Amino acid sequence: MVVKEPKLIPGEARCLISDYLSLFRAIAEKPKQNRDAETYKERVNHLFWMCMQLDDITDNPGKFFRWLGFIQGALWQFNLRSIDEMRVDNYKIINGKSPP
């Protein structure tokens, strides 16, 4: 079975990226790639770095959504965003508007 990738609306994606970057600016020290992050601080800095890369991959929806999913999973785990909030976020970047 072939799964169709959702279309990505770049302008909405950039708004979402900006919102998430604001979250990370409030809790992270500095964006830093660190795949071996062990501490909360190191992981948040790595997620901040990943979020900064998202704008460069909006032309590749598959990669964008994989990275976004990873970041959103961590946001939920760290209790920074709820599933319902992220559901609205995702609806906007795919449909260009808030859910009904």
Image (cartoon, grey):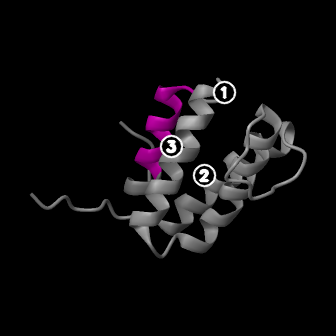
State which tag comes first along the sequence, 2 or 3: 2
Q: Quadrant of the N terminus?
A: bottom left
Q: Is residue 51 above or below residue 85?
A: below
Q: Amino acid at mark 1?
A: Phe
Q: Secondary structure at mark 1?
A: loop
Task: State how far apart marks 1 and 3 are (Cα).
Answer: 17 Å
Residue ID for mark 2: 16
x and y percent of residue 86 in the render?
50, 36
Examine the rendered structure and indicate whether residue 7 appears above or below residue 30.
below
- Dividing the picture into quadrants, the one containing residue 44 is top right
Q: Which mark identifies residue 89?
A: 3
Q: Going 55% across and 66% down the picture, which residue do you hit?
A: 11
- Residue positioned 61% across, 73% down in the render: 56
Residue numbers of the magenta segment: 82-92
Is most of the magenta stretch helix, strand or loop?
helix
Q: Earlier in the sequence, mark 1 or mark 2?
A: 2
Judging by the rendered image, the residue that carries numbered circle 1 is 78
Instruction: Mark 2 and mark 3 in contact? Answer it, CB < 8 Å.
Output: yes
Q: Please, which residue is most extreme toward the right here?
A: 29
From where the camera sits, is residue 96 visible?
no
Query: On the rendered image, what quadrant is the C terminus found in?
Result: top left
Kindly report the distance in space between the C-alpha atoms of the residues bearing marks 2 and 3: 7 Å
Report whether 53 appears left or right of 25: left
- The one of 93 and 38 positioned closer to us in this rendering: 38
Amino acid type at image mark 3? Asp
SS at mark 2 in the image: helix
| Residue in the picture at 73% in, 50% down | 46
Nearest to viewer (mark 1 / mark 3)? 1
Residue 95 placement (x, y as % from top left) = 37, 54
Quarter-of-image position of residue 43? top right
Looking at the image, how many numbered discs can be counted on the residues? 3
In the rendered view, tell whether residue 17 sits above or below residue 74.
Answer: below
